[in-house]
């Protein structure tokens, strides 16, 4: 792998946001678009345990998380662009195998291969943004990208359901294949190399280990990585449990994508709001306040469910109230974690993504596996994970919350 001889034009802020959103959307589509197809997948592969179909999500997310550890050093050595292109090729191969897999075991292996390829989209998109921006500006760009990206969870299950109306479930993976090819073409044609020459690192075990040790020495990075892991567990638990909650508990049937979209809209609204206010109010003040909101709303919901199963309207209302602040927390936690580690942005992004992705997937899967025909185990797990988020932030900030340094508006434009 080598860098191109002729440099490409720098991305405008608009195209940077759009490309980061498109890369993130690939991961969201790979999870959300097949949610309506899980019962069909279970029937076609003759699964005896309904909870086993959760592995379609868990296998993908687990490889998506742990594989990021490899992409960080690779992107810090060879550059962002070439590694992304190779990884998208891996995702495409996995998508083809999902379409043709004759057994559940091979299908799960293909899902793992998709996760392996998609892991680079997370590492490299964050590293590219960190290469080009910093501080509150980075949080704003990430929030704008997340706002666009959050349209995907709103519409993805509906797209999957629409495909099922006219074709078998394997066509869903055909649609994923087409999208991945389009993103690959865009990256090949337009993505420049953003890694600065002075930040390039040799691909040697000692250098890789030193890079990860540099990340682990940063209390702020480690603390917000742990907090984000607990927060991510809440999202993964919801995604993994959503089909069972809406179809098995509330019997929504084909209307399930509408309920899923309602929560995605709530998350998207919070993410958009963060992009508008973070430059003024700062990352800590916003994220700390909203994580307390998240825990309080989750606690109230869990307590109500423990006494009596809430009707659908109340369940959706309280869940939307809880997740409406997710975007006000996650983007800022990500930025706070990445702020001290610009010199190893690829490795830092990889370690952050691996820990939050794999750890969040494991914790989220444990919450989801507790499904007993009611929403109570899910809501209880949501509340406990939110308390873990608060504990991690308190450790990181040495017990002090809501305090942000004064804003620095000197670097408010994207660097070329």
Image (cartoon, helix red, strand yellow):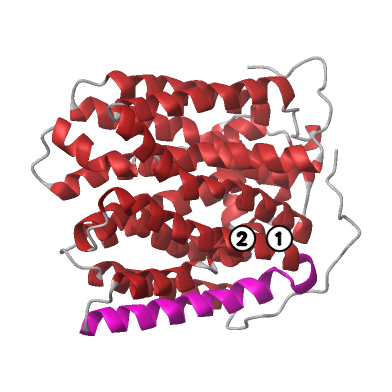
Hey, which residue is sitting farthest top in the picture?
A: 5
Name the residue nearer the viewer: 5 or 42: 42
**Does residue 81 appear in this view?**
yes
Q: Is residue 248 above or below residue 307?
A: above
User: How many marks are shown on the rendered structure?
Assistant: 2
Q: Which residue is drawn at the image coordinates 42% and 59% (left, top)?
A: 235
Q: Quadrant of the N terminus?
A: top right
- Kindly identify the residue that appears in the image at 52 percent across and 45 percent down: 152
Cα distance, mark 1 to mark 2? 7 Å
Residue 300 in magenta stretch: yes
Residue 355 or residue 107, whichever sits in front: 107
- Residue in the image at 77% along x and 53% along y: 134
- Label 2 near label 1: C-beta < 8 Å? yes
Element under disc 2: helix
Q: Is residue 360 visible?
A: no
The image position of residue 105, as x and y in percent, is 20, 29
Q: Quadrant of the C terminus?
A: top right
Question: Within 10 Å of the Cα at label 2, are there few (<14), some (14-19), or many (20+) other Cα atoms?
Answer: many
User: Which residue was labeled with disc 2?
Assistant: 271
Chief SS of the magenta region: helix
In the picture provided, is 270 more to the left or to the right than 173?
Answer: right
Mark 1 lies on residue = 275
Q: Based on the displayed image, in which of its 4 quarters is residue 92 positioned?
A: top left
In the picture shown, does residue 68 fall above or below 250? above
Segment colored magenta: 279-307
Furthest-right residue in view? Answer: 410
Q: Secondary structure at mark 1?
A: helix
Q: Residues within 10 Å of mark 1 (few under 14, many from 20)?
A: many
């Amino acid at each position: 792998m080598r860098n191109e001889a002729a440099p490409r034009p720098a991305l405008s802020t608009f195209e940077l946001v759009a490309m980061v959103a498109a890369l993130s959307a690939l991961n969201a589509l790979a999870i959300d678009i097949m949610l309506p197809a899980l019962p069909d997948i279970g029937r076609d592969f003759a699964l005896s345990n309904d909870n086993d179909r959760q592995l379609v999500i868990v296998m993908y997310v687990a490889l998506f998380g742990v594989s990021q550890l490899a992409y960080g050093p690779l992107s810090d050595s060879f550059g962002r662009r070439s590694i992304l292109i190779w990884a998208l090729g891996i995702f495409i191969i996995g998508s083809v195998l999902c379409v043709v897999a004759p057994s559940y075991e091979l299908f799960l292996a293909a899902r793992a291969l998709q996760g392996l390829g998609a892991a680079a989209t997370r590492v490299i998109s964050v590293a590219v943004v960190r290469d080009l921006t910093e501080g509150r500006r980075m949080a704003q760009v990430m929030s704008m990208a997340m706002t666009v990206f959050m349209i995907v969870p709103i519409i993805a299950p509906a797209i999957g359901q629409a495909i099922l109306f006219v074709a078998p479930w394997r066509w869903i993976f055909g649609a994923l294949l087409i999208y991945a090819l389009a993103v690959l073409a865009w990256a090949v044609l337009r993505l420049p190399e953003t890694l600065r020459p002075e930040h390039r690192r040799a691909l040697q075990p000692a250098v890789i280990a030193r890079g990860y040790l540099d990340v682990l020495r940063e209390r702020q990075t480690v603390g917000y990585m742990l907090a984000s892991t607990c927060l991510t567990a809440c999202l993964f638990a919801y995604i993994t449990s959503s089909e069972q909650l809406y179809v098995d508990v509330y019997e929504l049937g084909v209307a399930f994508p509408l309920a899923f979209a309602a929560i995605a809209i709530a998350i998207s609204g919070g993410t958009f709001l963060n992009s508008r206010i973070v430059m003024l109010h700062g990352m800590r003040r916003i994220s700390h306040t909203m994580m307390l909101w998240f825990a309080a709303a989750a606690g109230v919901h869990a307590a109500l469910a423990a006494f009596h199963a809430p009707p659908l309207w109340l369940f959706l209302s309280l869940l939307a109230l809880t997740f409406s602040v997710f975007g006000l927390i996650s983007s800022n936690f990500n930025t706070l974690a990445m702020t001290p580690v610009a010199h190893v942005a690829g490795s830092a992004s990889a370690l952050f993504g691996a820990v939050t992705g794999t750890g969040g997937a494991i914790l989220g899967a444990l919450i989801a596996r507790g499904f007993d025909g009611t929403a109570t185990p899910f809501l209880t797990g949501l509340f406990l994970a939110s308390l873990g988020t608060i504990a991690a932030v308190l450790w990181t900030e040495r017990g002090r919350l809501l305090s942000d340094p004064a804003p620095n508006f000197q670097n408010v434009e994207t660097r070329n």
